[in-house]
């Protein structure tokens, strides 16, 4: 289960009440270690811990790369996998899964 701000506040409240870590972890579907990490961070800073955005950071395409994709697509009218190989041959290393947005 993914944690959100509401769940983190609940974990801290339950730890303050004295609820065993194992019980909190089972209810939230996380490890006892994670419960203790959250609570320790709260005790050290006095603030509710903020979660970072999960996953790898997005790498934006440069304008030059976007233009190269459009140019090659117009010329070859092929799928993304083939277009990736064409672009790689021209010095661009752009994933076939990459989108403009």
Image: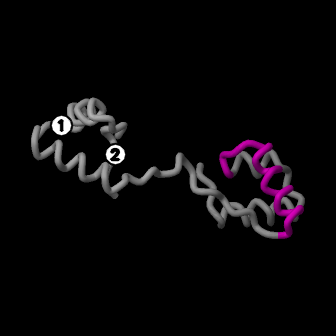
Q: Quadrant of the C terminus?
A: bottom left
| Residue shown at 78% from the left, 48% from the top | 23
* Magenta stretch encompasses residue 73: no
Q: Quadrant of residue 13?
A: bottom right
Q: Secondary structure at mark 2?
A: loop
Q: Is 18 on the left or on the right of 59, as rendered?
A: right
Mark number for residue 79?
1
| Residue shown at 14% from the left, 37% from the top | 78
Q: Position of residue 42 (x, y in %)?
A: 83, 63
Count neighbours of disc 2 (C-alpha within 10 A) and say few if under 14, some if 14 to 19, many if 20 or more: few
Q: Position of residue 68 (x, y in %)?
A: 24, 47
| Residue shown at 65% from the left, 66% from the top | 6
State which region is magenta: 28-46
Q: Which residue of the protein is positioned furthest toward the bottom in this rendering?
A: 47
As measured in the structure, the alpha-carbon distance from the residue carrying label 2 to the one carrying label 1 is 13 Å
Badges 2 and 1: C-beta atoms under 8 Å apart?
no
Sequence-wise, the earlier of marks 2 and 1 is: 1
Comparing 7 with 60, the one in front is 60
Mark number for residue 98?
2
| Residue shown at 32% from the left, 56% from the top | 63
Mark number for residue 31?
none
Total labels: the figure holds: 2
Comparing 57 with 4, the one in front is 57
Q: Position of residue 16 (x, y in %)?
A: 87, 64
Q: Quadrant of residue 47?
A: bottom right
Q: Position of residue 60 (x, y in %)?
A: 41, 54
Q: Is 58 on the left or on the right of 73, as rendered?
A: right
């Amino acid at each position: 289960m993914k944690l959100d701000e509401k769940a983190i506040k609940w974990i801290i409240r339950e730890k303050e009440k004295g609820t065993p870590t194992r019980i909190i972890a089972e209810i939230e579907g996380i490890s006892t270690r994670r419960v203790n990490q959250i609570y320790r961070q709260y005790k050290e800073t006095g603030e509710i811990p903020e979660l970072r955005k999960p996953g790898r950071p997005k790498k934006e395409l440069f304008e030059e790369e976007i233009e190269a994709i459009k140019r090659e697509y117009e010329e070859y009218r092929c799928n993304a996998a083939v277009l990736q190989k064409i672009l790689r041959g021209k010095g661009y290393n752009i994933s076939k899964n990459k989108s403009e947005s």
